[in-house]
């Protein structure tokens, strides 16, 4: 997977399979930058369709459809929690978690 730095983590491309992942809606200039990664008109048309689909999905789930910075969860970044305490009634559970990885869809 190749993150495209000029898109600020909003999209990535798997150079082996050609798979494109658009994480959040892109504006027109970002869409053009992503299209420039591909040479065929067929691939560029697929990029346009994918960007439109992501924008529509964002609106369908209550978003604005405008570009934004993706959350760490959306980027599937690993995270760690140094300590967690759960209080219930008079009992307190102290849990220690070293690190977790978001493996949604993997």
Image: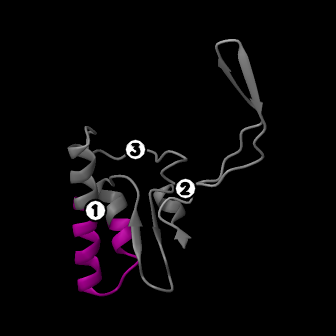
Q: Nearer the N terminus, badge 3 or badge 2? A: 3
Q: Would residue 59 be found to the left or right of residue 68 on screen?
A: left
- Which type of secondary structure does the marked residue at label 3 adopt? loop
| Secondary-structure class at tag 2 | loop
Residue 27 on the magenta span: no
Spatial separation of the CA atoms under disc 1 and disc 3: 13 Å
Left or right of 95? Residue 45 is left
Task: Classify 10 Å Cα crowding around label 1: few (below 14), some (14-19), many (20 and above).
Answer: many
Q: Look at mark 1 in the image and give the residue it sits on.
A: 51
Query: Outermost residue toward the front?
Result: 90
Q: Is residue 3 above or below residue 92?
A: below
User: Picture quarter containing residue 19?
Assistant: bottom left
Q: Main secondary structure of the magenta part?
A: helix
Q: Which mark is residue 68?
A: 3
* Residue that appears at 52% across and 48% down: 73
Between residue 41 and residue 16, name the one nearer to us: 16
Residue shown at the point (46%, 59%) measured from the top left: 7
Q: CA distance from mark 1 to mark 2?
A: 19 Å
Where residue 88 sits in the image (x, y, percent)? 64, 18
Residues under numbered marks 1 and 2 in contact, where contact means CB atoms less than 8 Å apart: no
3 or 2: mark nearer the eye = 2
Q: Is residue 6 above or below residue 41?
A: above
* Residue named by callout 2: 76
Tell me which segment is drawn in magenta. Answer: 32-52
């Amino acid at each position: 997977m190749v993150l495209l730095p000029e898109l600020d983590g909003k999209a990535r491309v798997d150079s082996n399979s050609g798979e494109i992942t658009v994480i959040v809606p892109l504006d027109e200039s970002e869409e053009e930058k992503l299209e420039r990664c591909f040479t065929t008109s067929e691939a560029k048309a697929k990029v346009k369709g994918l960007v439109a689909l992501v924008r529509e999905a964002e609106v369908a789930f209550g978003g604005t459809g405008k570009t934004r910075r993706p959350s760490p969860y959306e980027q599937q970044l690993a995270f760690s929690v140094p300590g967690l305490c759960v209080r219930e009634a008079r009992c307190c559970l102290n849990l220690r978690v070293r690190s977790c990885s978001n493996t949604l869809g993997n």
